[in-house]
Every structure is written in structure tokens, then in C-alpha cells.
Image: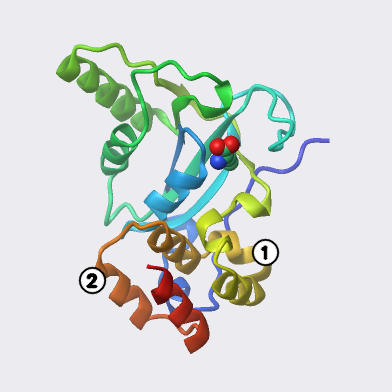
Amino acid sequence: MTAPAYEPGNPTAFALDADAPPPERTETATFGMGCFWGPDARFGAMDGVVRTRVGYAGGTDADPSYYSLGDHTEVVQIEYDPDRLSYSDLLDVFWANHAPFSAPHKRQYRGVVLTHDEPQREVAEDSREALESRTGKAVETAVESLDRFYLAEDYHQKYELRSTPVVADELEGVYGDAFVDSTVAARLNGFLAGHGDSDQRDAVFAALDLTPAALSEVRRRL
Ligand code: MHO
């Protein structure tokens, strides 16, 4: 039996999540760019990114999982606020943060833009061509249309944050299953991986109602 397609939630436990645009007011981008832990953190730290999640897509085999990936690829899915970021902004980050000129050793880690609609396909194809003409090199990264996205196992979501026990335990306790869709979790995951600047971190910390113990653990690890 095929699982239903993933439906993003809109958790409201913390102020920052309550203020985040609901899924109906966001747009979504899906990229394969190597192991999905890194891009989950990189995009999650960006202002204007509302939610991130990692999963498997780009193949045709049914019900992939980490140890039974079939012909799928590890991908990050980014929900963003179109008033604050454009698809093209995300593509700039995408092209600059994987190896578009090398053929991947495994399909699991291939570079791929999985587009959600026709306008995305045009922008993505144009950015791919622009990179080729700018560099004179053949781009191996493909642009394909997204068929469906399979959410990865919990332990892969917000991987860096999950490796920070005091904080992750508190957030998982508050959010339960909604942890993956939290803007707070996306930002903290990104900051803990070394992304973001101090102004951005201070703005997020000021809006957080984490316990002092969890907050000081985050600060200690930055
Ligand atoms: N760091 C792992 C890859 C994990 S990723 C979710 C490794 O280098 O084997 O594929």
C-alpha cells in the first residue's frame, strides 16, 4: 500500500511558529544535493525559509526508506515565504553548495532540481544554462519534475539539532510529531551547524520561549 503524500503542518507551540505563514501561503522547492543533513541546516537557517524537511524523491520505486532507497535520491524540501525569498534566490544557494559538474557515484547523492510546476521548471532550466555558459563546463545536475516526495525517518530530520540532546529533547517533548515542521527547529538546526549570523541568531533567541537550560546549551554550542 502506498502511503499518502506528505502534508506539512503548522505547529504553534512557540511564538516564532505561530507567526510563520501557514502552508497555503508558502511555496515549496525540492533539491537533491548530496547527503540531505547539510542542506537541511543550510536552508533552515535562512530568513524567509518557513519549514524544511528531508526525504526521498526522484525515482519510481514505491515506499523508499533510508535502507531501501531503490532508485530515489536524498532530497531537502524547503517551504519558503514568496514575499521574502524567490525560487531564484534558493537556486543560487543550491548551485553554490553541491558539485554540479561531477557525475555522482551513487544515485542516492545525485544533484537534481525537482520542480513543482512549469514556472519553476523554466527558472531552473535557465539557471542551469546560465551556469554552463558562465563556466563553459557541462553541468551533470538534472532538472526534472517532482512526482512525489517521501518523508525520511524522524532521526534524519534536523539532524544537527537532534545531536544536541538537551535542546532536542525539550523541543521534541513540546512538538511531538510536529517537530519536523517547526520553524524554530529549522533555525536552531541551521545555527548549530554553523549557519546564520549573530543578528539573526539574536532575533530568533529573543522570540524563543525555550527553558534557560536549553537556550544556554544552544549558545554554548554555537
Ligand atoms: N554521513 C553519512 C551519510 C548520511 S546521509 C543521510 C556518510 O557519510 O555515510 O546519507
Q: Residue furthest bottom?
A: 212
Q: Position of residue 158 (x, y in %)?
A: 54, 56
Q: Is residue 211 visible?
A: no
x then y, percent, for residue 140: 38, 16
Residue count near mark 2 (Cα–Cα under 10 Å), binned few <14, some 14–19, many ≥20:
few
Q: Residues within 10 Å of mark 1 (few under 14, many from 20)?
A: few
If the image is split into quadrants, where does the N terminus sit?
top right
**x, y (%) of residue 149?**
60, 38
Up-down: is 96 above or below 189?
above
Q: Residue at x 28, y 51 (%)?
A: 85
Camera-side mark, 2 or 1? 2
Between 182 and 192, which is closer to the camera in this rendering?
192
**What residue would you read off at disc 1?**
177
Measured in 3D between alpha carbons, the distance from the residue under mark 2 to the one under mark 1, in whole angstroms, is: 30 Å
Q: Up-down: is 7 above or below 121?
A: below
* Ligand 1 shown in quarter: top right
Residue drawn at x 50%, y 65% is 185
Q: Which residue occupies the extreme right position in the image?
A: 1
In percent of width and height, residue 63 lies at 74, 34
* Pointer 2 residue Cβ closer than 8 Å to ligand 1: no
Residue 218 in the figure: left or right of residue 201:
right
Height in image: 192 above or below 210? above
Q: Secondary structure at mark 1?
A: helix
Between 175 and 41, the one nearer to me in the picture: 41
Helix, strand, or loop for circle 2? helix
Amino acid type at circle 2 is: Asp
Q: Quadrant of the C terminus?
A: bottom left
Instruction: Give amino acid for label 1.
Output: Asp
**Disc 1 beta carbon < 8 A from ligand 1?**
no
Q: Which residue is mark 2?
A: 199
